Image (cartoon, rainbow, N blue to C red):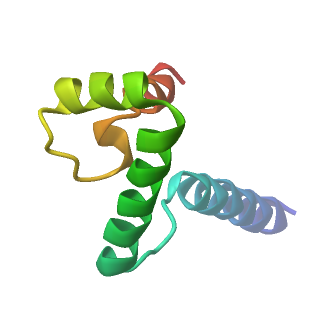
Amino acid sequence: MVKIRSVLTIFCLCLLFGTGVKSYAQPRINTADLKEHIRVHLEKVKFKNPGKYQEMMQKTGGNIIDCLSCHVEVAEGHKEQ
């Protein structure tokens, strides 16, 4: 009985940790695809909302590496959780 309970406990813990790691993992994306996606997104924002675009460019200093370069509130939201 103890052996079965131990095996079930270990199995459940493995499932919990496995899903926890998977849920926080970022999707795999090719670096070239990411750069292209960011470029297209920036072009859309530039035409759709020029004021916000200028504000974000000033905040980042024109050095945009990934999504979190501009979308700081997303990174702060993950830190609070």
20 sits left or right of 11 in the view: left
Residue occupying the point 53% across, 57% down: 21
Q: Residue furthest right?
A: 1
Q: Residue 20: x percent and y percent?
A: 60, 52
Q: Quadrant of the C terminus?
A: top right
65 sits left or right of 27 in the view: left
The number of numbered discs placed on residues in the rendered structure image is 0
Q: Residue 65: x percent and y percent?
A: 22, 53
3 vs 16, nearest the viewer: 16
In the rendered view, tell whether residue 57 sits above or below residue 23. Answer: above
In the rendered view, tell whether residue 76 sits above or below residue 60. Answer: above
In the rendered view, tell whether residue 55 sits above or below residue 35. Answer: above
80 vs 10, nearest the viewer: 80
Residue occupying the point 72% across, 66% down: 11
56 sits left or right of 26 in the view: left
Q: Quadrant of the N terminus?
A: bottom right
Q: Residue 77: x percent and y percent?
A: 50, 24
Q: Residue 28: x percent and y percent?
A: 46, 74
Residue occupying the point 48% across, 19% down: 80
76 vs 61, nearest the viewer: 61
Residue occupying the point 38% across, 58% down: 38
12 vs 66, nearest the viewer: 66
Instruction: Locate residue 22: give its quadrant.
Output: bottom right
